[in-house]
Amino acid sequence: MTLTQVCKGIAIVDIPEASLSVLCGCPENTIKFLFKHGIIKKLEAAGVRYESGPNAILLSEIPVQNGRFANVAEFPVLQMLYRQGMIVPGHPGNTGRRPMIIGLPEQLAAQAAYIYYGNYGIESPEELCPEDTERGRALVRMKRWFSFGSFKQSAELLELKPVSSSIMELKDGAFLRRLGVNRYEFIYGGQSLTVDLALPDQEDSCPYALPSVDITREGFSVVHLGEGDGWDPERPCMSSLVMHNGAIYLIDAGPNIEESLAAVGLSVGCLKGIFHTHVHDDHFVGLTALMRSERRLRYYAAPAVRRSAQCKLRALSGVDEHDFGRLFELHDLKPGVWNDVDGLAVRPDYSPHPLETTIFRFAASDEAGRRYSYAHGADLSSFKVIDAMTTSDDTAPGISPREAAVAKALYLEAADLKKVDVGGGQIHGSAKDFARDQSGELVLSHGIHPAKVAALGFGRMAEFGEQRSFFGLRADWHRQLAQSLLRLYFPQLAQQELDILLASPLRTLARGEQLCRRGQALQGVYLSLGGRLERSEPGSGRLLSLRAGALLNALECSRGLDVALSFHAAQRTEVLDIPADIFLDFVRRNALAADFERVDEVFSLLSSCPVFSGLEFLPAFIALARAAVERRLVPGERLDPEGGYAVVVEGALALYGGPTLVELIGPSDGYGEDGLWGGGAGQFRAQAFEELRVYILPRESLMDKPLVLWRLRERYERRLAAAKARLQLSWRPEYDMGLSDIDAAHNAIFVAMEALLNEASNDEAALAALLNTTKEHFSKEELLMKERGFPRVDGHALEHAAMLALIGDAGARLALGTERGALVHELKDALIYHTLVADRLYLPWLRDRA
């Protein structure tokens, strides 16, 4: 038995005597790390070329760590099934075994759903396209062709191995022992090895190096962010940026998208939105980065693609449709026609692929009226595959002759710049189909090797960060941006006051150029309008890196001090250079000094709080500081953040789960996440442990800041998991909803579950009583939710159905030998989790309308 540490968060445990090679942890781009470290090797047997690699995966217990997916098993599983040949008939790698997926039961269920959606998307035409069921039926018929006529459940393809006890046998004498959260011990033949599935914060997270490239904001341009695919260990996956009137949009979000953006001088917060083609992982897993933006980004997609993304995201991370809308500003695009996106014409068209997929076309006109276009075709099908799937039988899997002709015509429709997937194989395009393409410029992408492109005699590959500009920005664009930023800083002031500042000169800094230096006499106050500024002196703390919108030296100027911090341009950066004397007169004339001082105190506090650290868009940070409300509490006094978030300034806050002290919260830390993510569930109680001073950030000040919401969600999940682990074996008052009828029903269900522990009882009768008691309560509860107007009753009913199915399977599982205590534990755990999470969401509707 050997352990190979590929990188932090990814390891391989090989137990050849048990024919096991376990991939421990699978964050984004795991496959590329395995290629880079020689874990996956090329093999040949009986004239068949294939690959080696792990045949099992140990999942993280925490599905999202440090804001990134921790269980991205789609590509590792595909590599096992097809590139190793474990599922291919007659293949040397097909030994009759299925890939083994090991994890906690809830993570196994999540992975099974996530992999299913990754393979097939949504299978119901009515769910896929309720607005156009004919289109939905056509898409499902097409997908059935790629899936050889049927959609297979993940359990048919995989061996799902739940970690249901502290020590369990994996296979042939190889055992797995759980040591703690994300810590495991492998045992074989008297030997043991330990692994830790905790992911580092950004460190070692990217398998390839990227060059640093300066790009410029344009009126209409395209920046190439990746030409590889999910298997290429040297290049990022196919992606592009589209700029229009200075706004920046991303096309698809594959693995390590943050690193790709950083290499061209951008952060997620610089984007205005994303155009999403489909949800295969090499175009999808970067969504977590976008959900952690400092403001809600716009999400543009055809409705079927958006629904597919929501389903896959819900399976992978628990973010449901409602939460998806909290983290993104959703904009459905009508397929097959031009949509107006703030003056940018955008047309998505459905394209043949194993799941719902669109190609995109973008067009914009310059001031002279000339129209330019860019076509982006990710994950195409070759004409050979399109011909093979064409059928006149509208009941058979495939597409109609008309659909085939339309798809080919769309692929070949000329554009000024066209970028197409020519990765080859069953589910990607073929370069030869574009040999006579009439576009002004043809870029070949999605994994094709540079040498192959050179041999074709047409088309080319783009370099990373390469920018194609169609036309530039309006001459007044930077002034208009400065106006909007100053209005964010000073929302109450008259326009004539802002005009005084706007009359200041614009200045462009080259990469590395010093803007100001600590200790120097203050010459100006600087409003950054593009690029990025970084601290020049080493150290830690606030204001390490700032993007467009930073207002530097404002506080020092109002105090009459010298420059406090040194900054230089990390890339080409534009600033509005406001002379110090003009800004000081502006502050005095509008009596802003006191506001500056109060904002600075709250700003300093928030900068040191983990929930708010790292925010780079200063206007949003300042708005948070201005919204904060100070409160003082005496020891023992209850703190209710009222749906907001409380940050401790002085003293300590005691957090209780029932009678148990969960933790003491000190300065620069806070509480209130259950009110934001738990529907005001009240699982925890907070009170002053000593003299306490806090700032409360109102709920409305947080709701447009996804990065803050996401961090609070991670905190909520961690605290909820800890409370659940302490309270799950017996019913406690903390589980009560505060509604006597519902609480009594929950207790009755719990008692009926415990009755199953009695081996002398009649299992059939006990299960029937449990099922009837649960059905009766769920029926009454759903009726009550409808009467009170709870908007998510349909989703709640689905959770009820899942619980009833779990109870319904209990008898068969007992008959098959499932340990009675473990089964009852699972049932009680499911009930408690449902009570603590799902049921708490409708409490406001019952209380407000009581």
Image: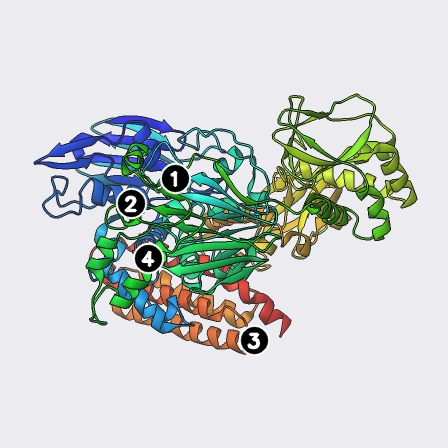
Residue drawn 24% across and 46% down? 425
Q: Disc 4 or disc 3, which is closer to the eye?
A: 4
Mark with earlier residue (4, 1): 1
Q: Which mark is residue 788?
A: 3
Q: Report how far apart the C-alphas of labels 4 and 3 lie in the structure.
A: 38 Å
Q: Disc 2 or disc 4, which is closer to the eye?
A: 2
Q: What is the secondary structure assignment of the residue under circle 1?
A: loop
Q: Which mark is residue 355?
A: 4
Q: What is the secondary structure assignment of the residue under circle 3?
A: loop
Q: Determine the image quadrant of residue 843.
A: bottom right
Q: Determine the image quadrant of residue 446.
A: top left
Q: Report how far apart the C-alphas of labels 4 and 1 lie in the structure.
A: 21 Å
The amino acid marked with disc number 2 is: Ala
Q: Residues within 10 Å of mark 3 (few under 14, many from 20)?
A: some
Comparing 768 with 557, the one in front is 557
Q: Report how far apart the C-alphas of labels 1 and 2 lie in the structure.
A: 14 Å
Residue 500 seen from this side: yes
Q: Disc 3 or disc 1, which is closer to the eye?
A: 1
- Residue tagged by mark 1? 227
Residue drawn 87% across and 30% down? 560
Q: Are marks 4 and 1 in contact (CB under 8 Å)?
A: no
Q: Report how far apart the C-alphas of labels 3 and 2 lie in the structure.
A: 58 Å
The amino acid marked with disc number 3 is: Arg
Q: Residues within 10 Å of mark 4 (few under 14, many from 20)?
A: many
